[in-house]
Amino acid sequence: MNTQIKFTLNGSPVMVEAPGEISLLRLLRDHLNLTGTKEGCAIGECGACSVLLDGRVVNSCLVLAPQVNGREVVTIEGLGQQDGAHSASDLQAAFVKYGAVQCGYCTPGLVIAGEALLRSNPMPTRAEIIDGIAGNLCRCTGYQQIVDAIEQTALQRAERTQQHAAAKVQE
Amino acid sequence: MNSFGYVRADSVEEAVALLNAPGLTSRVLAGGTDLMVAVRAGETSFDRVVDISMIPALRRIEMNGARLRIGAAVTFSEIMRHPLILQGARFLADATHSVRTMQVTNAATLGGNVANAAAAADTPPVLVCLDAEAIIATPQGEHGSAPLWERAPVASLLRGHLKHAIPAGGLLIAFEFDPLVPETRNTFLKLGRRNALTISRINIAATGRQDNAGAIADVRLVAGACFSRPRRAHEVEAMLRGQPPSAALFAEAGQLMMRLMVQETGQRWSTEYKSRALAAMVEEALENVLPLHPEMATEAVRESMR
């Protein structure tokens, strides 16, 4: 049974006709062609399908598609967007720089989880970062490089905020 | 693929009416962390899900007179940082935090954890330890359009693994309990196969208060995933009450709890390991809530456990 689903996706309003009994993950991949969000376990254990729903990270395999009606979803494709143009976000660039990407399958979910963590806790300790990505499984990296990438992004953002503040004072 | 409809309820009255619409088998959808897994596994016992996760009345944490009230659709993430809960039932926050993964705690709800009634669930033992009551809206009037609000102890709703006694067509609204007074210590311990994203092999919820002389004035103890359902271990509590705390007494309490578990659930493949682990966890929980040297028991201990 098809149903109409209207929501905000990566900052833009979308309307899509889709079966009401599919997951948000299937809606994104099969009906909206956003294949950056991956299906790993499909039972909420691996975090590969992580997206932001109203700003909070959730497993999109555990969200029923029509549940997002009237709500806001951000996928990995939405993170690097600025004024409609695509480029890697600072966190995505740090993942590349610090070797946090190997096979790449878990990467979109980990970047989303890392972003959610940094938005709620801009200066996490390493232990807090490890806690923050506890819902994301990676079989390649051993996690250290991923923690490095998130930690360095936090430092860079803090530095930029300080520079902004200093520039404001000078003005 | 199984086919079913979806409808979002905006109020408790609407939800109960939708759940009791004639000719349709409806299921409650809240966080989806259990239901969506069942759907994927081929669960086809319903025609429609009623989404209750956006009903404002079910999403509040507030004081109701002297009682602390938590809406059934409040998420684990909301519980783990709410000041009223950190103050009045810290071990409930610890239990939700023990799930560890943000993706799950941002979605999973307290009502869902109770209604799913899994033996290894983390929050029901804490609610039972608090003697919490559930508030349930049950259908009344034509198609349940004028629901009746009932109260029942959470312990009475849990009937064994994946079995609950919520009346047919009823909806969990909230949980209510007396917040713990500052003199009452509380603890939640969990033994799992990993640190994160794991169900409890055993969990313990406990509270304890000592009188001025240091004797045990009050103690409550609940073990999860050990008995047919979470219940207060009254036998162990009675043995402890009035006694001065000591390592020997706590060891005896652990042994008694272990015997109760084996008595009720019988010998299983896991019993040899689980009974020893349970005894050790009971001792640790009692040391946390009834410290032998209260002046040395600090919040730092708890912080190191989180």
Image (cartoon, coloured by chain):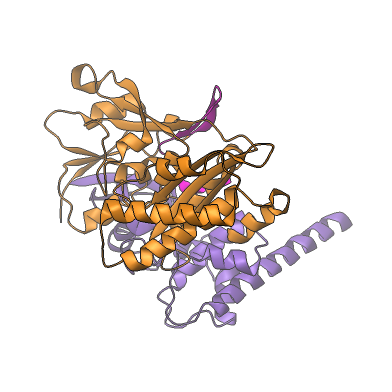
| Image quadrant in which the C terminus of chain A is located | bottom right
In the rendered structure, does residue B54 fall within the stretch colored magenta? no
Q: Is residue B238 above or below residue A143?
A: above
What span is in magenta?
A: B60-82
Q: Is residue B54 left or right of residue A120?
A: left
Nearer to the camera, A158 or B240? B240
Task: Specify the farthest residue to the right.
Answer: A170
**Residue B226 in view in this figure:** no
Nearer to the camera, B24 or B191? B191
**Can you tell which chain is drawn orange?**
B
Coordinates of residue A149 in the picture (x, y in percent): 60, 74
Q: Is residue B211 left or right of residue B149?
A: right
Q: Is residue B28 above or below residue A111?
A: above
Count of numbered labels shown in the rendering: 0
Nearer to the camera, B126 or A147? B126
Q: Dividing the picture into quarters, in which one does residue B170 lie?
A: top left
Residue displayed at 18% across by 45% down: B4
**Residue A125 in view in this figure:** yes
Coordinates of residue A147 in the picture (x, y in percent): 58, 73
Residue displayed at 43% across by 71% down: A137
Coordinates of residue B276 in the picture (x, y in percent): 41, 64
**Can you tell which chain is drawn purple?**
A
Coordinates of residue B208 in the picture (x, y in percent): 56, 42
Q: Dividing the picture into quarters, in which one does residue B232 lie?
A: top left
Residue displayed at 22% across by 16% down: B141
In the rendered structure, does residue B77 fall within the stretch colored magenta? yes
